[in-house]
Amino acid sequence: MPQTITTKLSEHFVGLSYQDIPTSVVDSVKKLVLDFLGVSLAGSRTESGRIAQTFALEMGGSPQVSLIGRKEKTGIVHAAFANAICAHSVELDDVDELALFHFGPPIVSAALATAEMVGASGKEFLIAVVAGCEMMARLSRGCNPSLRDRGFHTTPVCGAFGAAVASSKLLRLSSREMVSALGLAGAQASGLMEMYDDSMQKRVNPGPAARNGVTAALLARSGFTGTDRILEGERGFGKAFCDEFWPEKVLENLGEEIPVNIEFKPYACARPIHNAIDCALSIRQQPGFDSTRIKAIRVWRHPAWAKYHMNNSPHSFHEAQVSLPYSVAVALLEGNALLQQYGEDRLNSEQVQRLTKMVEVLEDPSLPRGVSCRMEVTMESGLFLSAQVDYPKGSLKNPMTHEELEEKAHLLGDEVVGKAALSEAIAKVGDLEHLCSVVELLKPVCLRS
């Protein structure tokens, strides 16, 4: 009988060693971990992060796994759940190039929790994160854009499988056990795109993915078996979540390449909005620009994303972070789109509200990329200012430097643990493959008693 997709993937991931991972991927995943720590620390101080961490502590379990930004510990599945929500609570977490999902919240949260529980080394943790990210990327490649177009959120849906692989790797499961873990993860995969409103709905999505992936791996370790046809079965993932599923893309160049391409966010909002922000920042620097004399703002987007993020009157932090008109307005007025630009004082600003309502979005199928954006600002004088951005800051073709990522981490984490502790954590990430224990990485980002 031919091997199933899940069996082939499991054998690949069980056999994955540090020597198999290209230096470029190691460097990229280190940046991912660094970015995750910063956004998780900031997220732990948001209302959604606070609720998630309080929930995790109330659920109890053996106090063996750390909550980022806290001194208390809790059970492994609850810590994975809460840390993933914290990492997604400030809209500054990493992003994938193809489907714009987030690796860090589900994968790093699951791997950190499992690594701490089993006493894994930094190198073991690093390998597990790479494996989890590869699983997530491969599955997304096989199901998108169909999965997203049906209303499913790739981060939690595919993230559950990636979290299961990362956790399985750290638990040293056999290939048969990892097959079961993936089957059980598929039974728990979920997540919808109905989340762009005045609620915390979007924040929760990676939490169950991290928790369910860890749960699946722990169950498999205990002998609970899962199907090996979870992906291609008649009632499996491909049929349930997608109108079109491409198994060959999931397995393409398996063992020959690790298709993990990670981008990072400089702005505190949904990734497809970043192109528009970069357009606004470019226009802001052009001769004749005056934010008090703007008459009209027109934005052209590719049809793939033109109907998303269209709220012209957001009323909360959560709504503003997924509003392209609002983000364009604050970028034009203040020259940035960081956390403070999404605060209540900005939401209530007459200037911000005026420009937010002025933004008109049109479709242009000729734009080269799904997230491409062209903007035209008309001044009261009649002057037209324009810009087009196909690759936003932080993308693979317009990357953030390591120094910029460190600066971002300090901006987000210093207020929580202090600059010295954050610097220590950054140094630990740089030396991750040589750490005897992941606990060394966690100590600086968890409060001391």
Image: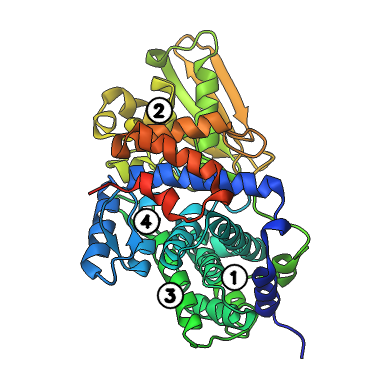
Q: Is residue 275 left or right of residue 315?
A: right
Within 10 Å of disc 4 (Cα), the crowding (few <14, some 14-19, many 20+) is: many
Within 10 Å of disc 3 (Cα), the crowding (few <14, some 14-19, many 20+) is: many
Kindly report the distance in space between the C-alpha atoms of the residues bearing marks 4 and 1.
Answer: 29 Å
Asked if marks 3 and 1 touch (Cβ < 8 Å), the reply is no
User: Is any atom of residue 299 visible in this view?
Assistant: no
Marked residue nearer the N-terminal end (3 or 1)? 3
Residue at the (35%, 40%) spot, across then down: 320
Q: Which residue position holds label 3?
A: 215
Residue at the (73%, 83%) spot, across then down: 3
Asked if marks 2 and 1 touch (Cβ < 8 Å), the reply is no
Marked residue nearer the N-terminal end (2 or 1)? 1
Q: Quadrant of residue 256?
A: bottom right
Q: Amino acid at mark 2?
A: Ala
State the residue in front, 367 or 279.
279
Kindly report the distance in space between the C-alpha atoms of the residues bearing marks 3 and 4.
Answer: 15 Å
Q: Nearer the viewer, mark 4 or mark 1?
A: 4
Q: Amino acid at mark 4?
A: Asn
Marked residue nearer the N-terminal end (4 or 1)? 4
SS type, badge 4? helix
Asked if marks 3 and 2 touch (Cβ < 8 Å), the reply is no
Q: Which residue position holds label 1?
A: 242
Q: Which mark is residue 329?
A: 2
